[in-house]
Image: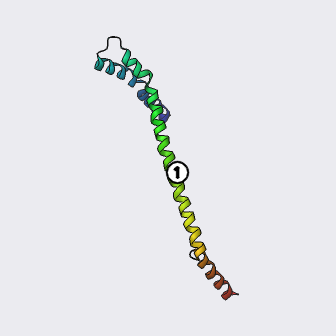
């Protein structure tokens, strides 16, 4: 299908094309005669991705913790309102009055 071929082209284009480009760019910028620096960068490039993945996980866990705290705070406020007679307590008394009038 077209989607599969497009995905394959993009995967190859974005996955394999940058390696020789970066290798050449780093070699030219550093004027190294042994081409070692460019190869080292390519070899350890994946550690950068793992590092960014870890940073993303830390931010995601912080967001999840904040959401959980907000949810717990809302539930606590609901419980306090119920105990004070505000909220569902007034709805229950109204429904009782309606059932008495119809009976």
Picture coordinates of residue 37, whole percent (x, y): 37, 18
Number of numbered tags placed on the structure image:
1
When asked about the image quadrant of residue 24, the answer is: top left
When asked about the image quadrant of residue 90, the answer is: bottom right
Q: Which one is in front, 88 or 24?
A: 88
Please identify the residue farthest to the right as the structure is shown: 103
The residue shown at (49%, 45%) is 60
Please identify the residue farthest to the top as the structure is shown: 33
Q: Is residue 65 above or below residue 14?
A: below
84 relative to 54 in the view: left or right: right
Are there few (<14), some (14-19), or many (20+) residues within 10 Å of tag 1? few
Picture coordinates of residue 48, whole percent (x, y): 43, 30
Picture coordinates of residue 19, whole percent (x, y): 40, 22
Q: How is the image coloured?
A: rainbow
Q: Is residue 35 above or below residue 49?
A: above
Label 1 SS: helix
Task: Name the image quarter holding the C terminus.
Answer: bottom right
The residue shown at (41%, 19%) is 40
Picture coordinates of residue 14, whole percent (x, y): 41, 29
When asked about the image quadrant of residue 13, the answer is: top left
93 relative to 4 in the view: left or right: right
Q: Is residue 82 above or below residue 48?
A: below
Q: Which residue is disc 1 drawn over? A: 65
The residue shown at (43%, 24%) is 16
Q: Which one is in front, 100 or 83?
A: 83
């Amino acid at each position: 299908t077209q989607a599969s071929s497009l995905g394959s082209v993009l995967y190859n284009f974005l996955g394999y094309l940058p390696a020789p480009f970066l290798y050449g760019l780093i070699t030219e910028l550093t004027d190294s005669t042994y081409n070692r620096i460019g190869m080292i960068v390519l070899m350890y490039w994946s550690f950068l991705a793992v590092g960014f993945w870890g940073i993303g996980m830390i931010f995601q866990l912080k967001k999840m913790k904040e959401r959980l705290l907000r949810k717990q705070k809302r539930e606590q406020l609901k419980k306090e309102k119920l105990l004070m007679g505000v909220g569902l307590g007034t709805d229950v008394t109204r429904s009782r009055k309606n059932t008495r009038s119809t009976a």
